[in-house]
């Protein structure tokens, strides 16, 4: 039966469920396929996730199992659970409806939809897949579409063959014909080129590009333009960014303590990704390199080492190893295979056949690798003295850190053995008080017990409590004795275990411990701890002695003490999981956690910072790869409920059962198994990998994926919209040696992709969702697309590729492509989120597309966009001058249309533009009365010169663009230290020149001026003999109000304080200027000040108006855009610029 | 009641949106609430609405129907940054006077730093209101309205370190980035005022520790992130990003937007039935109204003199006035930080430090509650007061003049929409160290906040990374005892 129809029937059933329609009306000539689908989607997940834990193969509460139909029919202690066809008499229904006791599930009831589904299923006869028993492991493995091998379905026959261009079209058209929907016509060349450039480069084509293509008579014009765009380096920047979404790329670590929060070399991964796309690295190689580049031949590795950033650019979770590994498992499984394996960290997957054991198999793989303190250079290191000197210094700093770390580690391990008794007691107290201190930072004094070590002892206590540990079982008995009768009970107990007549005890208790207890029955638990401590110290000295002996004699190191009783004691100190066998952790926070006293912490922080700072300085010398290297292979255990303090059964490092099948083998090669994992992922037999990448690529070409959940192909995903097409493309991808560019071609050359995006009522009536792809989808430029396109059309795009990430939001704004922007996962700028940039904390399945006013406010008001509008105007003028030389209004409009939209304006658009230019002028706004500059004042308090500032920084006016130095210039005329901002400004180091905020009277009137002059003095410390004095530096600022007609009207001085600046009532005439002049008094410091002023109109009786007419603060402005610039910006804000047809 | 301005919802284009559009536009004013509600209750909406899909969301902030009748429409959190001491404010412990200077014994409660002997409270407590709830003289003014307040004395969280506790309080997780509580609230309910962001975070003198994560949307769509205001600034364009164009006059901008509208209409004429085009056209109107309304809401100078006198002066007062103006205009969630960091973190010299801090906070808090009540807004506004944790009853070494961090037990104040005023919930031990009765974890607080907003914390979920996330993760239960 056809899949669509099956889905349709199932959907119909659901609708019946939801609407609660009459049961009779719902009777469908349902065949087994429909029943199977219904069971898989609505029944099995409920049984597996809500019932199986207590009524499955492991546990059968009330004797009931729900993992097979037979079990349900035979039922449990209360009788049969279901009566097929009769929900009303099925006990299961009573239980889940909570009508009877027991009400099930006991914790949280099923949702109404789930209850209805179970009822409906019983009503329909309780279909069950043949010979199948439900389990967490096999759920859906044999039936779910995504776990079935990729088919290479035959290309379907179509009635119309003229429409077909590539194999894709036959699949699409066959479905369309079956639904009696005609495909849409091909878009015109203008639209196609804009769409191609959007899809492949993320930026619009130029007017000339369009003209050339539109007028290209060659038969292969379209194909050759596709090839040309695919060969552009901008292609890698566009598609690399798509991949960086999957790879949760960020330049920062997220939450971490006491370390550099940046990844200064994350960019090497980004650059690797971009060039991999540009070079069309086969996708299977691309995946293998990102998981296991270090396992490839050395020569290859050196050049693709940066690929490992895929694993390492994730967040650091305050360096919690388990969380870091979880993140890596997640990005690999969800990002590459659409499997939500991370769900199985704490319990078997609720919906997919992924048992917890499989999670820990992968955990073991990633646990067997670690990152070096200093990353290797990508490719060949530069052959320069500068680089060699740099490396030497780096090496020295690393050695200093590791030497200290090793020293402290040795001390810690030794302390753990020497003070075993103290640790045992402390750990017991921690355990008894129920305090868990493993996840927070404790600061202790040097010499105190180490909290991490206490935890390890605590975990030893837990591990041994319920087993009969010969050494520690007496301890557990003693620890449980009541305090008030401890001595008495301990005596009795000591006598009993030492009694050789008591055969059982004598065998199970270590004889040395037993003898010691008999000799000195402890009076208290403290006594007992000391007894254990002494025995362990004695054991250790024996061991140290024979080790020393063997070293002296050059004989092989001993493996155990000869006496088995003493060896049992030695194991407490030396077993691989003994508390003292703590490995030297990765340098960084984990080390700090291990050394919680302040002195050691400060030392580690200092040494670590020295390394990090130096490492970050090398970003311009050579890129370094954020790699992983194999360490000693880790033999993983399953952590009970994800809790690392509760390790359970061992599992091998191996691939997922659901993909590898019954005959899977553990990863056996030397090393972590990452290479074997990577190869298994890209094995052509793996049904997921090719489908997942094909789906992602399709999504970016059509705006809609074939599988609506691109990172979840598990059982809760909807079946593909075009299953045969998905498999066809996946098969071709593998056949084409995993060439992504060939896949692009196959899609872009198809008639399907070339369709217009226009809505058609006839087709929408049949398929409103466009699941059949009867048209192309109109798409919106995303965050990068908008910003890159703004730069492209204004002619300012900086095409430099690669290198350290740049901050996009600071001035002067960078003109580089957005993919090179700094991504800070700790504090993602709100602008990124407002434009739907995905959270870089986890692999992203695709972006949401929201429309919020914050996006519009950015386009309307942000200085970056305003700046772009200015650049656009200049660029359009430059382009049109070369073309015509005549700049009439229409020509100028025309050339702006050419540059922004690569087309000519239509008559209505020209009319709209013309009426925009004709519309009335504004009354002069209040801020036009103000000017900002600098000048000189003579001895008679006349302003003798006034030069307007030239440079606007976005928040302040300056003399020029250079940043002011401490004493930037001998010639004050060239000085850049002067500035004026919203509230005040900065004066010059010398008294002259002054900064001047100038107001010009619009008419004859009476005014008063009010204000407040504030000077913030820097504090400096002066040594006066032995005494240290803090005092204000400099001598403050002088402010004057000077009229060009009336002379000086006020003079104020302040130093590190504030003063009101009120004027008397003044009569001013039209055009008269009032200058608010500020200088730095006599000293050489430059002084920052605030001097907001308000100018009030005064009536005839001298009373001032309630609200000031002019406010220096409210009226403060940067350069004003002219009408043309506003027009240019309007074009950048249009839907046509933002959407792609 | 707050002024509700949700008449500006976007109208769909004539031809129907796709099924997925229908589902993703849940509650976007399409009259689909009924259907969407049924689907959501059935767990089917979530299944059909994959996170991060490219589904179109026309107006994500349109008001949405809660799960059940709410008792609060708005939430204000007054964040006493740094961790105020419970035993010096709302949880008197006479035992401390008796044991002052003596060792507390091994309580088995490790703290971040070394602590020494028991330290009594330097402040005196007095009973206030009809309820007679004791309040220390640090919060005299707040004491006057104690009958409107529920004192939860049995709060606890997981660790005694600032950063994880702040994250846990605001985002529900100690370590990883998750959507903040305000993002969940606006995701669940939308906003009542489409001319303003639905969620604000206010802090004087810079961003608090963690910055944008504390009001971020994480994997929820960006529309639900909070808007940060650095309240040290008094100028509107420094307060909100991009809210004013400093290169054009407003009339010039209006003419420009009229031109854009005209061009967009011409564009749309040949592209029927794409509601996204219309949504973006509308967003220009929303944005320009937002420019006006944002200026208005932040202009505290519009408040009469008696209001300024009621709140007092200083940044806390300004912030609380702004918060009230936001609530009045239908903003859903306001987070008010007292300090970017440090603040109430009195490791030493607690007496002076706490007195100074309380002087700044007490009057504005009292004023805020009083003002809301007078305006009839307290009934619909849930007010939460508390820091990331409390402080130890033992003094911190070596100076013995302050207290260390304490996550085992501390106090929160709750008031307004749906809260039982004049009530004490839970208790700490005799020293005020650990919560022992009716303990309330942050997860429980979160469940309760959502409950007051009419949201079931177990049902307010978002599918991400293959599973359904919620503010309370897998924890939390509603504290019914504190509800009116």
Image: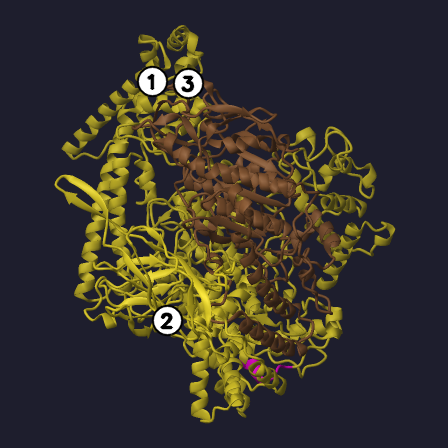
Looking at the image, do the residues carrying marks 1 and 2 touch, with CB atoms under 8 Å apart? Answer: no
**Residue A312 has which mark?**
none
Count the numbered circles shown. 3
Q: For the stretch drawn in magenta, what is the main secondary structure?
A: helix
Q: Distance between the residues labelled 3 and 1?
A: 36 Å
Task: Say which residue label 3 marks.
Answer: B97
Q: Can residue A653 be seen in this view?
A: no
Q: Which of B311 and A32 lies nearest the eye of the viewer?
A: B311
Q: What element carries label 3?
A: helix
Task: Say which residue label 1 marks.
Answer: A529
Are discs 2 and 3 both within one chain? no
Using the rendered view, name the quadrant where residue A49 is placed. Answer: top right
Q: Distance between the residues labelled 1 and 2?
A: 65 Å
Q: How far apart are marks 2 and 3 (CA)?
A: 69 Å
Image height of A937 relative to A18, above or below: below
Image height of A79 relative to A660, above or below: above
Q: Are there few (<14), some (14-19), or many (20+) residues within 10 Å of tag 2?
A: some
Q: Which of B15 and B351 lies nearest the eye of the viewer?
A: B351
Check if residue A188 falls in the magenta segment: yes
Q: Position of residue A614 (x, y in %)?
A: 25, 55
Q: Which chain is depicted yellow?
A: A
Task: Say which residue label 2 marks.
Answer: A801
Q: Which chain is depicted brown?
A: B
Chain letter for mark 3, please. Answer: B
Q: Where is residue A606 in the image (x, y as percent from the top left)?
A: 25, 45
Q: Does residue A1042 appear left or right of residue A679 in this picture?
A: left
Magenta extent: A186-193
Chain letter for mark 1, please. Answer: A
Q: Which of B119 and A385 lies nearest the eye of the viewer?
A: B119
Q: Are there few (<14), some (14-19), or many (20+) residues within 10 Å of tag 1?
A: many
């Amino acid at each position: 039966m056809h899949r669509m129809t099956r889905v349709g029937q199932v959907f119909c059933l659901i609708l019946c469920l939801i609407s609660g329609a009459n049961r009779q009306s719902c009777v469908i000539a349902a065949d087994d396929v429909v029943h199977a689908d219904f069971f898989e989607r609505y029944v099995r997940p409920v049984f597996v996730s809500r019932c199986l834990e207590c009524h499955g193969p492991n546990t059968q509460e009330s004797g009931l199992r729900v993992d097979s139909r037979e079990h349900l029919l035979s039922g449990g202690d209360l009788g049969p659970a279901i009566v097929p066809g009769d929900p009303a008499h099925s006990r299961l229904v009573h239980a889940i409806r909570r009508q009877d006791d027991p009400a099930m599930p006991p914790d949280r009831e099923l949702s109404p939809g789930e209850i209805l589904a179970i009822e409906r299923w019983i009503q329909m006869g309780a279909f069950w897949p043949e010979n199948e028993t439900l389990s967490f492991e096999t759920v859906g493995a044999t039936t779910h579409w995504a776990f079935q091998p990729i088919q290479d379905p035959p290309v379907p026959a179509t009635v119309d063959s003229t429409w077909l261009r590539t194999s894709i079209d036959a699949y699409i058209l066959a479905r369309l014909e079956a639904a009696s929907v005609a495909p849409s016509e091909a878009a015109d060349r203008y639209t196609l080129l804009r769409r191609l450039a959007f899809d492949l480069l993320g930026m619009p084509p130029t007017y000339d590009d369009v003209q050339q293509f539109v007028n290209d008579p060659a038969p292969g014009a379209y194909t050759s333009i596709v090839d040309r765009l695919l060969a552009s380096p901008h292609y890698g920047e566009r598609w690399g960014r798509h991949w960086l979404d999957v790879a949760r790329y960020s330049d920062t670590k997220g939450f971490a303590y006491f370390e550099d929060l940046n990844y200064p070399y994350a960019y090497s991964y980004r650059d690797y990704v971009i060039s991999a796309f540009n070079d069309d690295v086969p996708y299977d190689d691309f995946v293998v390199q990102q998981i296991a580049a270090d396992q490839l031949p050395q020569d290859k590795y050196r050049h693709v080492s940066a690929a490992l950033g895929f694993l390492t650019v994730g967040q650091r979770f305050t360096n919690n190893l388990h969380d870091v590994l979880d993140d890596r498992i997640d990005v690999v499984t969800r990002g590459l295979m659409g499997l939500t394996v991370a769900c199985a960290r704490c319990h078997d997957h609720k919906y997919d056949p992924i048992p917890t054991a499989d999670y820990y198999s992968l955990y073991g793989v990633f646990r067997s690798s670690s990152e070096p303190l200093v990353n290797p250079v990508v490719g060949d290191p530069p052959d320069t003295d500068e680089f060699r000197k740099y490396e030497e210094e780096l090496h020295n700093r690393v050695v200093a850190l590791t030497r200290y770390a090793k020293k402290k580690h040795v001390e810690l391990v030794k302390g753990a053995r020497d003070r075993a008794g103290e640790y045992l007691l402390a750990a017991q107290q921690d355990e008894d008080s129920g305090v868990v201190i493993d996840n927070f930072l404790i600061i202790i004094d040097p010499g105190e017990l180490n909290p991490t070590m206490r935890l390890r002892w605590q975990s030893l206590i837990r591990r041994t409590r319920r087993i009969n540990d010969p050494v520690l079982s007496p301890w557990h008995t003693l620890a449980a004795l009541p305090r008030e009768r401890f001595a008495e009970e301990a005596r009795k107990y000591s006598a009993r275990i030492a009694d050789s007549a008591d055969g059982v005890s004598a065998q199970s208790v270590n004889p040395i411990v037993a003898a010691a207890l008999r000799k000195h029955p402890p009076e208290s638990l403290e006594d007992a701890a000391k007894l254990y401590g002494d025995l362990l110290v004695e054991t250790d000295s024996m061991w140290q002695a024979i080790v020393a002996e063997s070293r002296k004699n050059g004989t092989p190191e001993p493996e155990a003490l000869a006496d088995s009783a003493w060896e049992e004691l030695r194991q407490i100190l030396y077993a691989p999981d003994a508390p003292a066998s703590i490995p030297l952790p990765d340098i960084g926070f984990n080390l700090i956690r291990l050394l919680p006293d302040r002195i050691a912490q400060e030392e580690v922080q200092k040494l670590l910072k020295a390394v990090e700072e130096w490492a970050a300085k090398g970003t311009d010398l050579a890129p370094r790869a954020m790699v992983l290297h194999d360490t000693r292979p880790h033999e993983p255990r399953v952590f009970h409920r994800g809790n690392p303090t509760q390790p359970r059964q061992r599992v091998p490092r191996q691939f997922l059962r659901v993909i590898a099948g019954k005959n899977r083998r553990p990863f056996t090669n030397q090393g972590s198994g990452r290479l074997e994992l990577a190869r298994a992922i890209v094995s052509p037999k793996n049904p997921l990998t090719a489908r997942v990448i094909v789906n992602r690529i399709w999504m970016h070409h059509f705006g809609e994926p074939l599988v609506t959940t691109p990172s979840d192909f598990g059982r809760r995903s909807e079946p593909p919209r075009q299953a045969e097409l998905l498999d066809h493309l996946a098969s071709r991808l593998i056949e084409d040696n995993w060439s992504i560019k060939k896949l692009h071609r196959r899609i872009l050359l198809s008639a399907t992709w070339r369709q217009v995006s226009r809505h058609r009522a006839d087709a929408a009536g049949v398929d409103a969702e466009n699941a059949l792809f009867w048209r192309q989808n109109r798409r919106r430029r995303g965050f990068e697309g908008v910003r890159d396109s703004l730069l492209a059309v204004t002619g300012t795009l900086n095409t430099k590729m690669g290198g350290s990430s740049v901050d996009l939001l600071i001035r002067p704004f960078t003109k580089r492509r957005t993919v090179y922007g700094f991504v800070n996962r700790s504090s993602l700028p709100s602008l990124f989120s407002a434009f739907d940039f995905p959270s870089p904390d986890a692999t992203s399945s695709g972006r949401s597309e929201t429309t919020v006013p914050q996006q519009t406010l950015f386009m309307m008001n942000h200085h970056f966009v305003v700046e772009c509008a200015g650049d656009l105007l200049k660029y359009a003028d430059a382009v049109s001058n070369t073309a015509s030389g005549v700049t009439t209004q229409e020509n100028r409009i025309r050339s702006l249309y050419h540059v922004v939209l690569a087309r000519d304006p239509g008559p209505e658009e020209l009319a709209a533009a013309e009426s925009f230019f004709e519309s009335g002028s504004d009354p002069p706004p209040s801020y036009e009365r103000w000017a900002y500059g600098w000048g000189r004042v003579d001895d008679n308090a006349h302003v003798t010169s006034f030069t307007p500032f030239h440079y606007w920084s976005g928040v302040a006016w300056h003399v020029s663009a250079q940043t002011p130095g401490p004493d930037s210039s001998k010639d004050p005329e060239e000085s850049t230290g002067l500035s004026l901002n919203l509230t005040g400004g900065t004066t010059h180091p010398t008294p002259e020149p002054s900064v001047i905020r100038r107001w010009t009277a619009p008419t004859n009137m009476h005014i008063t001026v009010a204000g407040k002059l504030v000077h913030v003095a820097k504090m400096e410390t002066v040594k006066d003999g032995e005494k240290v004095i803090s005092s204000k530096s400099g001598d403050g600022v002088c402010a004057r109000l000077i009229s060009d007609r009336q002379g000086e009207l006020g003079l104020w001085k302040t130093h590190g304080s504030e003063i009101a600046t009120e004027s008397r009532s003044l009569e001013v005439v039209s055009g008269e200027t009032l200058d608010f002049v500020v200088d730095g008094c006599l000293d050489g410091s430059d002084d920052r000040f605030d001097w907001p002023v308000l100018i009030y109109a005064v009536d005839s009786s001298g009373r001032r108006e309630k609200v000031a007419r002019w406010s220096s603060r409210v009226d403060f402005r940067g350069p004003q855009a002219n009408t043309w610039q506003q027009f240019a910006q309007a074009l950048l804000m249009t839907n046509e610029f933002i959407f792609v047809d | 009641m707050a002024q509700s301005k949700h008449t500006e919802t976007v109208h769909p284009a004539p031809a129907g949106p796709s099924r997925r559009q229908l589902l993703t536009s849940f509650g976007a004013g399409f009259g689909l609430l009924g259907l969407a509600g049924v689907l959501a209750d059935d767990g089917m909406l979530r299944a059909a609405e994959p996170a991060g899909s490219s589904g179109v969301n026309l107006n994500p902030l349109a008001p949405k129907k809660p799960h059940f009748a709410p008792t609060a429409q708005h939430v204000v959190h007054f964040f006493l940054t740094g961790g105020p001491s419970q035993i010096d404010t709302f949880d008197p412990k006479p035992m401390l006077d008796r044991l002052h200077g003596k060792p507390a014994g091994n309580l088995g409660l490790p703290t971040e730093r070394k602590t020494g002997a028991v330290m009594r409270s330097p402040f005196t407590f007095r009973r206030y209101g009809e309820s007679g709830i004791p309040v220390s003289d640090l919060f005299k003014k707040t004491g006057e309205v104690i009958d409107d307040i529920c004192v939860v004395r049995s709060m606890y969280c997981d660790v005694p370190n600032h950063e994880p506790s702040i994250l846990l309080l605001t985002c529900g997780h100690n370590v990883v980035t998750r959507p903040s509580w305000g993002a969940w609230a606006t995701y669940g309910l939308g906003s009542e005022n489409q001319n303003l962001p639905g969620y604000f975070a206010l802090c004087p003198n810079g961003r608090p520790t963690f910055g944008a994560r504390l009001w971020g949307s994480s994997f929820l769509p960006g529309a639900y992130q909070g808007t940060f205001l650095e309240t040290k600034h008094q100028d509107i364009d420094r307060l909100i990003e991009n809210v004013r164009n400093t290169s054009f006059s407003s009339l010039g901008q209006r003419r420009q937007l009229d031109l854009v509208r005209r061009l967009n209409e011409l564009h749309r004429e040949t592209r029927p039935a794409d509601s996204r085009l219309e949504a973006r056209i509308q967003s220009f109107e929303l944005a320009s109204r937002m420019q006006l309304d944002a200026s208005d809401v932040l202009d505290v100078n519009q408040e009469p003199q008696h209001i300024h006198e009621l709140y007092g002066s200083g940044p806390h007062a300004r912030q609380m006035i702004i918060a009230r103006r936001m609530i009045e205009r239908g903003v859903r969630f306001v987070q008010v930080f007292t300090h970017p960091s440090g603040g109430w973190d009195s490791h030493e010299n607690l007496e002076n430090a706490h007195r100074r801090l309380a002087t700044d906070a007490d009057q504005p808090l009292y004023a805020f509650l009083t003002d809301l009540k007078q305006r009839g807004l307290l009934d619909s506004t849930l007010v939460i007061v508390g820091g990331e944790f409390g402080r130890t009853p033992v003094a911190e070494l070596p100076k013995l003049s302050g207290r260390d961090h304490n996550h085992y037990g501390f106090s929160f104040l709750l008031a307004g929409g749906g809260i039982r005023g004049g009530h004490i919930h839970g208790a700490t031990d005799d020293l005020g160290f650990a919560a022992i009765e009716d303990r309330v974890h942050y997860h429980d607080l979160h469940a309760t906040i959502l409950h007051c907003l009419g949201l079931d914390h177990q049902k307010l979920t978002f599918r991400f990374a293959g599973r359904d996330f919620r503010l309370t993760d897998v924890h939390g239960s509603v504290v019914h005892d504190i509800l009116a």
